Amino acid sequence: MEHVSLPPLCHLAICGGTHGNEMSGVYMVREMQKQNVDRVGSVSITTVLSNPRAVDACRRYIDTDLNRCFTSELMSAPVTDSTPYELRRAHELNAQLGPKESREGVDLLCDIHNTTSNMGLCLIFYSLDCVPLHIFKYIQSKMTSTPVRAIQLDEPKSEAFSLESVGKHGFALEVGPQPNGVLRADIYNMVKQAIDLCIEWIQGFNSGSTFEGGEVEVYTWVKNVDYPRDPTTKEITAAIHPQLQDNDFKLLRPGDPTFLTFFGETVKYEGEELYPYFVNENAYYEKAIAFQLGKKISKTLPSISMKRD
Amino acid sequence: MEHVSLPPLCHLAICGGTHGNEMSGVYMVREMQKQNVDRVGSVSITTVLSNPRAVDACRRYIDTDLNRCFTSELMSAPVTDSTPYELRRAHELNAQLGPKESREGVDLLCDIHNTTSNMGLCLIFYSLDCVPLHIFKYIQSKMTSTPVRAIQLDEPKSEAFSLESVGKHGFALEVGPQPNGVLRADIYNMVKQAIDLCIEWIQGFNSGSTFEGGEVEVYTWVKNVDYPRDPTTKEITAAIHPQLQDNDFKLLRPGDPTFLTFFGETVKYEGEELYPYFVNENAYYEKAIAFQLGKKISKTLPSISMKRD
């Protein structure tokens, strides 16, 4: 069986408020800063409120979505007076936590998000990186009362647009359902538990433990589905069907209801069997996404331990 | 038993988007406008998107909360260049649907709202008006699968600050839980059913039916409860306790948990037995309201029929 050995993970960044109205991360980061959490055992921890102006306004963003700003192309473009606020802030974060694809970046970046979708606790990361996969496997084995899932993105790192791509390793922690602007204790506690387990895993890794590999199930994106729309006004003409609403990660089969029009008609799914997620996510209305569809694949994960010099 | 007779209710206004990120009303009004609903039987219907700029921005409001603008004092103050957008819009709405406390106002104004709280379907109205109480009783008797409740406000009409106070009779239809910016089919269908029943009741009333009186239960406001806060920074230090979250209208007794601090400590309720509602409503964070508490009272409702000339 394959084995991977990697340098110790000495520097962890925990970010919240990348979207200013996703409150779990905002309050988690503020609380850690208030308690002056900057080291746990072998791990130095940097906590960052990523988009403070959007947090103050309790909006996703001020000028543009911060979590779409971190491609290598955007990170190498000059900042001018007309650069949108979030892109300027992305350059600051890249300087603080990266630079992206350099030896100086933080070892692991965890960025906390919320969704209005009923997705439970989801780790989202780029493929070809087995560190978040091992952390996912560890959290999933420990948090037995919560559904814990992984979504793997297939972009190369240079094209990765989200904040966690700035670290050497990274993942987004996506937790829901929680309305934007609202803090729910149950969701906050899930996030807290996942962060604690992530730190626990790193401690074990840095102390020389070997984590066994094995088979893990992850979801990979296949396509987006938009709302039915009026051909002229482009306004949506239907809501997510009650049978799909809140049923993220439940296999969607041809003929299953997807939308209920304002006239009361049911729109049925046509296409191959796939798994829906981000069902009725608030922020995706403007991106013309009613839900995403993905495949569930089984991945063989190598065992992992720290490389000794 | 007391009996009330009133003139026919010829003109109904249905408003949505008074708060621009409460989507049930936005889509209900748009759909009715698309279908050119301007009369049903004996009732002429005006549909209004109350705060179009906030709807476009998908925010509660642009400058100030529109639904706090309709006091007689504000409605009689002059509009100047420095008047906030929503107050100018309130004057327009008052001209279109009122003027408030005049003979020209619409006979009944129904303003559609959403809450992130688990309040089911709630009619909110001012006391001393038995028309919304009768409509409440009618809707409650017909929508048996949904909890239907009434909250009665005790301000005199001149001090009433919300849009529905512009009509001769009026109520807010408050429906949840639904995240801001999100449209749920189940909530939309509840609103649709309630509007249809309201119109059905008016048809019956205008055709000469007598609606029997009787005892009805309504909630009346007693006090607001704020989040625990840091005495220096004023930031909140706790979330609504999981045992209170989603339990609107479940009697709160001394010793019951109300908050869970970020340290994991439970804050318990002290005070008389009361009913919580608007528990963890998004928009009330800025108003320093974690939840409201009210009494449940029994009201004797007179029978009602149309006054014949």
Image (cartoon, coloured by chain):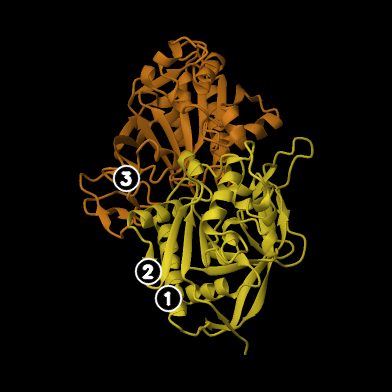
Chain colours: A orange, B yellow
Percent position (x, y) of residue B105? Answer: 55, 63
Tally of numbered tags: 3
The percent position of residue A297, horizontal first and vertical second, equals 29, 37
Residue annotated with mark 3? A227
For the point 50% across and 21% down, the residue is: A84
- Cα–Cα span, label 2 and label 1: 8 Å
Quadrant of the image occupied by residue B169: bottom right
Q: Residue under label 1, please give it.
A: B203
Please, what is the three-letter code of the amino acid marked with disc 2? Val
**Residue A204 visible to the viewer:** yes
Residue shown at the point (55%, 16%) measured from the top left:
A92
Amino acid found under the numbered disc labelled 3: Tyr
Q: Which mark is residue B219?
A: none
Q: Chain of mark 2?
A: B
Is A272 rendered above or below residue B33?
above
Is any atom of residue B250 visible in this view?
Answer: no
- Disc sitting over residue B40 in the figure: 2
Find out whether the residues at labels 2 and 1 contact each other: C-beta distance under 8 Å.
yes
Q: Position of residue B132 (x, y in %)?
A: 56, 71
Question: In the figure, residue A231 lies in which quadrant?
Answer: top left
- Local secondary structure at mark 2: strand
Nearer the observer, disc 2 or disc 3?
2
**Quarter of the image where the N terminus of chain B is located:** bottom right
Q: CA distance from mark 1 to mark 3?
A: 35 Å
> Which amino acid does the dot numbered 1 rest on?
Gln
